[in-house]
Image (cartoon, rainbow, N blue to C red):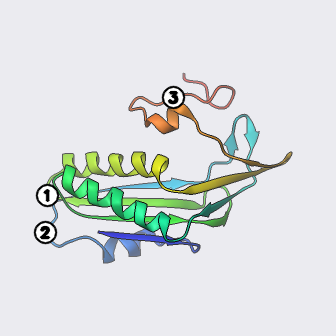
């Protein structure tokens, strides 16, 4: 189990190759990136702040919970903070297990829980100025079938 909170971008290939146990039959990973839209507005950049020390402890707590709840061998969580632009990677969650179902389930659990429990604050920089991101109930719920941000992306 590894947790990192850092300013610099992560190297997906390098971080996945140097992490995880030998003998795992499955690895599931999720990479979250900065979107270029939100609430029907263009996003020029995002600034993420965090609570040093507390953030790492919460990510470790969530990772330990995933290890207990799912039949996984190891996990990796890397979350960035600082200034980022659209398409920049924000978060990497990776899980290794003997079988794919546990890896998928634990990976989804980790990203869904850390999204709402880790002390990160996001500020979007738009053409109209800066604004702090508020909760989105659908994002908070981690709905399995997705949800729509009205006026941004309509379901087809």
Q: Is residue 110 above or below residue 74?
A: above
In the image, 35: left or right of 27? right
Other residues around mark 2 within 10 Å, as few (<14) / some (14–19) / many (≥20): few
Q: Is residue 42 above or below residue 71?
A: above
Residue occupying image coordinates x 32% and y 74%:
17
Of label 2 and label 1, which has the lower sequence position?
2
For the residue labelled by badge 2, is the local secondary structure a helix, a strand or a loop?
Answer: loop
Residue picked out by circle 1:
98
For the residue labelled by badge 1, is the local secondary structure a helix, a strand or a loop?
Answer: loop
Other residues around mark 1 within 10 Å, as few (<14) / some (14–19) / many (≥20): some
Residue occupying image coordinates x 56% and y 28%:
148
Q: Quadrant of residue 128?
A: top right
Q: Quadrant of the C terminus?
A: top right
Q: Which mark is residue 51?
A: none
Q: Quadrant of residue 80?
A: bottom right
Decide which of 86, 56 is in the foreground and name it: 56
Residue occupying image coordinates x 27% and y 54%:
65
Residue picked out by circle 3:
147
Counting labels gives: 3
Front of the two marks 2 and 3: 3
Q: In this view, which residue lies farthest toward the top?
A: 156
Of label 2 and label 3, which has the lower sequence position?
2
In the image, 143: left or right of 86? left
Observer able to see residue 94? no
Q: Is residue 154 above or below residue 30?
A: above
Q: Are marks 2 and 1 in contact (CB under 8 Å)?
A: yes
- Please state the horizontal and vertical placement of residue 123, each as a whole percent of the image: 70, 53
Residue picked out by circle 2:
23
- Please state the horizontal and vertical placement of residue 46, each as a whole percent of the image: 69, 56
Could you tell me how far apart the alpha carbons at marks 2 and 1 are, in whole angstroms?
Answer: 8 Å
């Amino acid at each position: 189990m590894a947790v990192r909170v850092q300013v610099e971008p992560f190297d997906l290939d390098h971080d996945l190759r140097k992490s995880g146990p030998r003998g795992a039959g499955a690895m599931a990973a999720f990479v979250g990136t900065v979107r270029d839209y939100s609430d029907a507005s263009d996003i020029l950049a995002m600034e993420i702040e965090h609570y040093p020390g507390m953030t790492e402890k919460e990510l470790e707590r969530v990772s330990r919970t995933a290890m207990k709840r799912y039949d996984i061998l190891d996990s990796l969580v890397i979350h960035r903070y600082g200034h980022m632009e659209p398409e920049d990677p924000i978060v990497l969650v990776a899980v290794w297990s003997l079988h794919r179902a546990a890896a998928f389930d634990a990976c989804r659990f980790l990203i869904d829980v850390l999204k709402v429990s880790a002390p990160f604050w996001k500020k979007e920089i738009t053409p109209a100025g800066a604004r702090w991101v508020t909760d989105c109930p659908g994002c908070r719920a981690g709905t399995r079938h997705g949800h729509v941000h009205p006026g941004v992306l309509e379901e087809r």
